[in-house]
Image: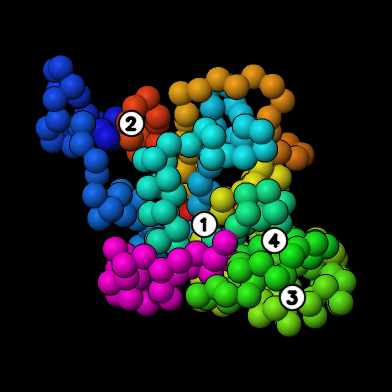
Amino acid sequence: MRRLFPVTDETAAPAGGASGGGAGREWSLDELAAAYAYPGPGPGGPAPWLRANMVSTLDGAAQHEGRSQPISSPTDMRIFGTLRALADVVVVGAETVRKEGYRPARARADFAAMREAAGQSPAPAIAVVTAGLDLDFSLPLFTSPLVPTLILTGASADPDRVAAAERAGARVVNAGDGIGVDPARAVRALTDLGHTRLLTEGGPRLLGQIVAAGVLDELCLTVAPMLTAGEAQRIAGGPGVTVPHRFGLVSMLEEDGFLFTRYARTRPAY
């Protein structure tokens, strides 16, 4: 792994590929945690910060045959685990839960002291965004999480499905006036529960809604050195925005041709 941006004396890979400095070696989890740390609290205390973690091929595919795993890498998965370990809650769409076979987040011994010092639970909660609650509540995500799974839905959600979710042990959170979820309301609702370090792993439809609502603060995008062609989804789908949202490059890491980028904007007021 080497850092390409910001440029440092470790940026250039040593001649012949020999390891040295930060290049050509595997970064420790502590180094990754420092590289992806959330912004510190402002003058008024902790404020919500919503980051997305996604992977894309060179030709813009966010998935291959419906899943993101084929375009990932071992280092991408280490960063994936690190981002989860830093978060209070992981926000994910119901379709992604079904396709990717989501399980509860697990406690990581490597991050236990860091999370305790930050006042966090042993593992992040999973928050599932769903309008219809078309989910299998017998899955471990609902029956045996370390931290109770949250269901973000609208006020008009089917009461029978809400009751089924609650019987399974999930906590149902109102984040919309109708059937669906308003992303800005979801951020406020999670913040009211004490979750300010927010992470979303998509899928593309949910990320598109978050982008359109203007509540995304940061994008951690892995660019895989692969081409897939076909008709795979981009990392964000759905209606476009009137004016493109401009983000600034925070950092870029590289390993085996994979680029691990961070883009962020100025902290918004919720």
As measured in the structure, the alpha-carbon distance from the residue carrying label 1 to the one carrying label 2 is 22 Å
Q: Mark 2 to mark 3: distance in Å?
A: 42 Å
**What are the residue bounds of the magenta stretch?**
103-126
Where is residue 116? Give x, y as percent: 33, 76
Q: State the SS at label 1.
A: strand
Task: Give the label, 3 or 1, closer to the camera.
Answer: 3
* Disc 4 target residue: 129
x 37%, y 47%: residue: 78
Query: In the rendered image, which quarter contains the C terminus?
Result: bottom right
Q: Nearer the viewer, residue 266 or 133?
A: 133
What x and y, as percent, mark residue 36? Answer: 36, 51
Mark 3 or 4, closer to the camera: 3
Q: Which residue is mark 2?
A: 254
Nearer-N-terminus badge (2/3) = 3
Neighbor class of circle 4 (other Cα within 10 Å; few <14, some 14-19, many 20+) is many
In the picture shown, does residue 134 fall above or below 145?
Answer: above
Q: Categorize mark 1 by other alpha carbons within 10 Å: few (<14), some (14-19), many (20+).
A: many
Q: Earlier in the sequence, mark 1 or mark 2?
A: 1
Tag 1 residue? 199
Residue 116 falls inside the magenta stretch: yes
